[in-house]
Amino acid sequence: MDGAWGQRRWRSALRKLGRDRIAMAAGAFLLLIVLGALAAPLYSSLVSHNDPFHSGLNAKIVVDGRLVPVMQPSTTGLRLGVTPIGPTWQPSYFLGADNQGRDVAARMFYGGRSSLLIAAAATLLCLTLAGLVGFVSGYWGGVVDMVLSRMLDILWAFPAYLLAISLSIVLISQTIVMGPFVIGSGSLLMPIFILGIIYVPYVARPIRGQVLSLRRSEFVLASIGLGLPRWRIILHDILPNVLPTLLVFMPLLMALNIVTESALSFLSIGVQPPGASWGTIIQDGQALLYTRPAVSLAPGLAIVVTVVALNLFGEGLREVLDPRTKSRNG
């Protein structure tokens, strides 16, 4: 019996070590992706030496010692029109060009910066709103809880993508004025605002349930019995116990926001020209899927890799912050 128990402990320890290494590797990979996105201006000016936001239909580059046009004569069908140059595997036009003659690799770096910025900002906005709603609803209860819960139910009734698409279609051409703040139609604040709203119910409900449970716990009831002010109870007794849950939600919610933002941008209701995101680059390569597949495959692969890394990192973070997971895994 002792031998079998020892073997189970060793297997559990090895599995945990493997999960920890995977989570650390995912975190390191995410850091590289973020650094690459931040280095987009350096890559454009020092490596590729071209502006990824201006058309290069008449541009020419040196490939294998020969000066060749970026937009080359078509070699398929009736040989009419032009086809963007494919991957050169050189600093300039490493992944080839899109149908406007723009450097796909340089646009990938800029697109990653936009996608990551929107996803991160929307995640912080969503966690802030959801945490606030969950705290107020769970702690105060009564009529306040009923009103906020019904509002969450209304948002919950709409599928997330349908709600995001509907809000984007309505707001994408509008200018929103909120006192001194003005959000233009082409601003990145628009998709940040939309993505920050649609996932609030998915986070606020678990937070509300956790606050309700903590509100009835012995240490909170003891603080209430001692006559401590509500703000002190929330900051010192409830918030430290809820904060790990919000941190675990962060990478998972960011992965959802990256996919949703890419879908909106692909439909032309997300990031607007001349800006770029991974979704807009996929749309740019849609017509070139059979002749220059790298234009669409590169950002698609970037989305997949980033989302997988975020999920693996989030799983590792949950292992560290959730004591129930620790106890289940031995």
Image (cartoon, rainbow, N blue to C red):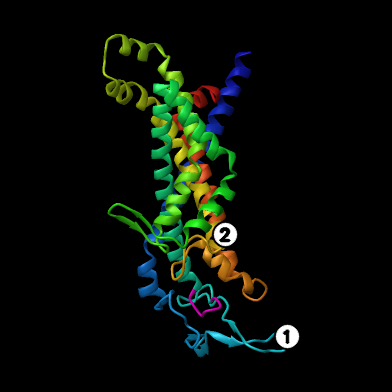
Q: Count residues near mark 1 (Cα–Cα under 10 Å), then give few for <14, some for 14-19, many for 20+.
A: few
Where residue 140 appears, x then y in whole percent? 39, 22
Neighbours of disc 2 within 10 Å: few (<14), some (14-19), many (20+): few
Query: Height in image: 130 above or below 322?
Result: below
From the viewer's perspective, is residue 271 above or below residue 244?
below
42 in the magenta segment = no
Judge left or right: residue 78 versus residue 182.
Answer: right
* Percent coordinates x, y for residue 100 in the rendering: 52, 79
Q: Tell me, for residue 69, which label it has, or none.
A: none
Residue 150 in view of the camera: yes
Tell me what residue is drawn at x 48 percent, y 26 percent. 146
Q: Which residue is tagged 1?
A: 77
Q: How many marks?
A: 2
- Using the numbered discs, state the Cα–Cα distance from disc 2 to disc 1 in whole angstroms: 29 Å
Q: Position of residue 86 (x, y in %)?
A: 58, 78
| Nearer mark to the viewer, of 2 and 1 | 1
Instruction: State the SS at label 1.
Output: loop
Instruction: Look at the magenta stretch and give its main secondary structure.
Output: loop
Locate residue 42: give its quadrant: bottom left
Magenta stretch: residue 99 in it? yes
Residue drawn at point x = 39 percent, y = 78 percent: 49
Q: Amino acid at mark 1?
A: Gly
What range is drawn magenta here?
Answer: 98-103
- Assign a secondary structure to mark 2: helix
Q: What residue is shown with label 2?
A: 301
187 vs 329: above or below: below
Q: Nearer the viewer, residue 157 or 90?
A: 157
